[in-house]
Image (cartoon, grey):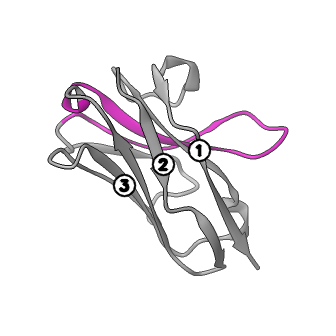
Amino acid sequence: QVPLVESGGGLVQAGGSLTLSCAASGRTFNSYIMAWFRQVPGKEREFVAGINRSGGSTYYSRSVKGRFTISRDSAKNTVYLQMNNLKPEDTAIYYCASGTAVTDTASAYNYWGQGTQVTVSS
């Protein structure tokens, strides 16, 4: 089991930066791929970024590519999402998730965190 706890959300002005963290408990962190999704009320959960087990391959949605960076630290059992040049449309609850393969389909992921709110003001 890989309980996940996100942190780092908050309020930031457009053009600013935030770094989200997702800490995983348990000794199986390296067995899972990790991903970030986001969701706004009334919409489906949207894939943002994913990273493979070694950290050597990363994947991004078109809307964040070039602005967001996903990374993982196996020594700390933590995955990060560095978000730069934030836009008001990035406002959402951000969730981290673990699974067996990087996909943009939320239902394919086994475990989810509780989410952290990111609000970008214009």
Q: Position of residue 50 (x, y in %)?
A: 39, 41
Q: Position of residue 115 (x, y in %)?
A: 59, 44
Residue 98 higher or lower than 86, as above or below = above
On the picture, is 56 further left or further right than 59?
A: left
121 vs 27, nearest the viewer: 27
Q: Amino acid at mark 1?
A: Gly
Circles 1 and 2: CB distance less than 8 Å?
yes
Q: CA distance from mark 1 to mark 2?
A: 6 Å
Badge 2 marks a residue whose secondary structure is strand
Q: Which residue range is magenta in the image?
A: 29-53
Q: Earlier in the sequence, mark 3 or mark 1?
A: 3
Check residue 115 in the rendering and tell me which mark sits there, or answer none: 1
**Residue on which disc 2 sits:** 6
Q: CA distance from mark 2 to mark 3?
A: 9 Å
Q: Earlier in the sequence, mark 1 or mark 2?
A: 2
**Residue on which disc 3 sits:** 80
Query: Residue at left 47%, top 58%?
Result: 65
Query: Residue at left 25%, top 32%?
Result: 29
58 vs 70, nearest the viewer: 70
8 vs 89, nearest the viewer: 8
User: For the N terminus, which image quadrant?
Assistant: top left
Badge 3 marks a residue whose secondary structure is strand
Q: Earlier in the sequence, mark 2 or mark 3?
A: 2
Query: Residue at left 31%, top 45%?
Result: 58
